Image (spheres, rainbow, N blue to C red):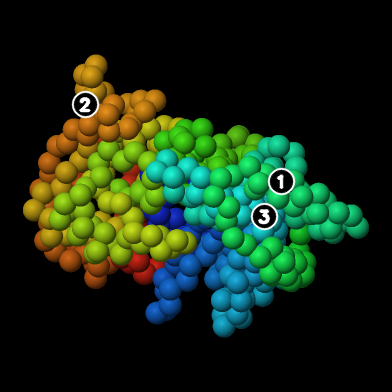
Amino acid sequence: MSIDLLLGLQWGDEGKGKIVDVLTTNYDIIARFQGGPNAGHTLKFDGFSHVLHTIPSGIFHPTALNLIGNGVVIDPVIFQTEIEKLAPFNIDFPNKLLISKKAHLILPTHRLLDAASEASKGKAKIGSTLKGIGPTYMDKTGRNGIRVGDILLPDWKERYENLKTKHLKMLDFYEGKIEFELSILEDAFFSAIDELKKLPFVDSEHLLHTALKEGKKVLAEGAQGSLLDIDFGTYPFVTSSTTTAAGACTGLGIAPNTIGEVFGIFKAYATRVGSGPFPTELFDEAGETMGRVGMEFGATTGRSRRCGWIDLVALKYAIRVNGVTQLMMMKGDVLSGFETIKVCTSYKTTEGSIEHLPFSIEPEHVTAEYIELAGWKEDLTAMTAEDQFPKEFNDYIAYLEKELETPIKIVSVGPDRKQTIFR
């Protein structure tokens, strides 16, 4: 048996949570492999809207196990709040949710370091969610981090104090001191640690290897998007983890030859939260319409998302880097009403037109070049089958499939679980 991957192909916010929720009935285990509470996966069904930050998006299905892998970083306080918000749904968390002992913990001082670092950058800030993600991954690679399994050890408080002391010394180096009451933050942190201990901690790589031997089906759930990858994203305006397919191997302890299908999710247009280059960004009525109709606000931060036309240069790049085998297009319904739809097919540079993603896509280096396709006016949100789509929408899908050389197997026409059409 193999492990299938589900990844975002843009700058995040593509709708991964919805599709994981839709696909969970086909899998025995849903395994989140990277990122932390900077993620916001929104699920809508039965009249409810749920935003998950750390918990995998298969949690509402009674038959699937949900695993938080070693590549994830966990804020116990945010995690506890997430669990409490799901209390009305009577989820059997001790038997449904497993946590890797090797996952790293976000300490209160990690969040303080994140805030101080971002504040010190002024206009050069990267748009951090201020959740302490970057400093936690820095401690992980610096071999100073505290892992979930460590809180079961008798000297874990000593380890905490040593790392806290290091962080407080680091805070002294930043200009423009930030105000904080560490004792209040710590009270909440240690209370949340006690709640965290009520869930099963596992050797997650062993669990997955055993599951595969037993013939169980696993879906690895990514967070953020490929263009935010620490290596292959629009650096330095990226996240601190590996958001591409390679991250599933390091974030779950699985071998490359165990990977089966790679599902790539993208929007019918493009969005970005925070700072960083965005070649197809719109500053006109079209961009405003996309944001308003698409309800483009960050599920984690609440910030407005920047909107623009779809970028095939960046999308082809993400497909190649990830080895995507199937595509899923989200939010086609948002483009209903546009007379024409623009598609970026290449970048204009000082050396001519290019169709590959270069080292820098800052506006001084590249300008998006477009073709135009006919738009459609029909409301897609009530459609339940592909044969109900207007011709222009089907033409748009066919054009993208041809250019991307990858089949589009799912088309989403609204946020609800039911508004998902298989092709």
Give the mark, 3 or 2, whose residue is nearer the N terminus: 3
| Coordinates of residue 408 in the picture (x, y in percent) | 33, 47
The residue where tag 2 is placed is 348
| Coordinates of residue 123 in the picture (x, y in percent) | 40, 43
Give the mark, 1 or 3, whose residue is nearer the N terminus: 3
Badge 3 amino acid: Thr
| Coordinates of residue 68 in the picture (x, y in percent) | 64, 56
Check if mark 3's residue and mark 2's residue have beta carbons within 8 Å: no
Q: Measure how far apart labels 1 and 3 are at the Cα level.
A: 11 Å
Image height of 246 relative to 64, above or below: above
Give the mark, 2 or 1, whose residue is nearer the N terminus: 1
Q: Secondary structure at mark 3?
A: helix
Q: Measure how far apart labels 2 and 1 are at the Cα level.
A: 47 Å
The residue where tag 3 is placed is 109
Badge 2 amino acid: Lys
Check if mark 2's residue and mark 1's residue have beta carbons within 8 Å: no
Residue at the location (12% across, 44% down)?
373
Q: Which mark is residue 260?
A: none
Q: Measure how far apart labels 3 and 2 are at the Cα level.
A: 44 Å
Q: Nearer the viewer, residue 260 or 287?
A: 287
Asked if residue 22 can be seen in this view, the reply is: no
Dot 2, crowdedness within 10 Å: few (<14), some or many (≥20)? some
Q: Nearer the viewer, residue 4 or 152?
A: 152
Q: Nearer the viewer, residue 331 or 391?
A: 331
- Residue placed furthest toward the right: 154
Q: Secondary structure at mark 1?
A: helix
Residue at the location (35% across, 66% down)?
415
Q: Tell which tag, 1 or 3, sits nearer the viewer.
A: 1
The residue where tag 1 is placed is 169
